[in-house]
Structures are given as C-alpha cells and as structure tokens.
Amino acid sequence: MRPEDYRKREEAVGEWRLGIITYRLGEEYVCEVDNVSPGARLARAKGRTREAAETQALGKARHLLSKTRVRPVG
C-alpha cells in the first residue's frame, strides 16, 4: 500500500508548535503528531476519516503535553 491524500500542517497548542501529518492507507486514515522543535513524535492514531484520526491523535498529544513541566529560562 502507498500513502495517499497526504497533508502536512502546523498548529499551536498552548505554547507548543505541533506538526500534524495525515494520510490515507487503504481504507484508513493515519495521523501523526510531533513536536516541531525537536521533531519528536508525540502521538499516532488511525480512523475511518481524516477528522477522526486527527481528533484522536491531537487528544493524545494534548494529554501528554498537559503533563509536561515547563521550567522558566534564566
């Protein structure tokens, strides 16, 4: 199978910049969310529609980011 209907975008969630990649593999959509700065993948989800996959992956990423401690610089 080859990825089809590929889309890449960025979105801000709080103080974080997230990269969102969504593509279709066969009958399912796959969404991967990463932290733009280091490029670490935070979440991956599958769904019957693009919106379902993105909603699920972004929910996982938001949950992980909400538990992340941010220390002041300086």
Image (tube, rainbow, N blue to C red):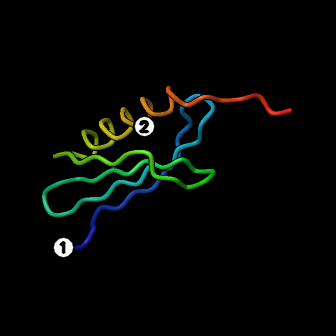
Q: Is 42 placed left or right of 36 in the picture?
A: left
Q: Is 60 placed left or right of 74 in the picture?
A: left
| Disc 2 secondary structure class | helix
Give the residue drawn at x 20%, y 45%.
47
Give the residue drawn at x 56%, y 36%.
12
In this rendering, the count of numbered labels is: 2
Q: Pointer 1: residues within 10 angstroms few (<14), some, or many (20+)? A: few
Height in image: 49 above or below 13? Answer: below
Report which residue position mark 2 lands on: 61
What type is the residue that disc 1 sits on? Answer: Met
Residue 10 at what x, y percent from top left?
Answer: 53, 47
Say which quarter of the image contains residue 22.
Answer: bottom left
Q: Is 41 placed left or right of 15 in the picture?
A: left
- Number of the label disc, if any, that sits on residue 1: 1
Closer to the camera in the image, 64 or 58: 64
Height in image: 18 above or below 65? Answer: below
Quadrant assignment for the C terminus = top right
Depth check, mark 2 against mark 1: the one in front is: 2
Residue 71 at what x, y percent from top left?
Answer: 71, 29
Q: Is 56 placed left or right of 65 in the picture?
A: left
Residue 69 at what x, y percent from top left?
Answer: 60, 28
Q: Are marks 2 and 1 in contact (CB under 8 Å)?
A: no
- Number of the label disc, if any, that sits on residue 11: none
Quadrant assignment for the N terminus = bottom left
Give the residue drawn at x 35%, y 61%.
6
Height in image: 12 above or below 25? Answer: above
Q: CA distance from mark 2 to mark 1?
A: 27 Å
Say which quarter of the image contains residue 60.
Answer: top left
| Disc 1 secondary structure class | loop
What type is the residue that disc 2 sits on? Answer: Ala
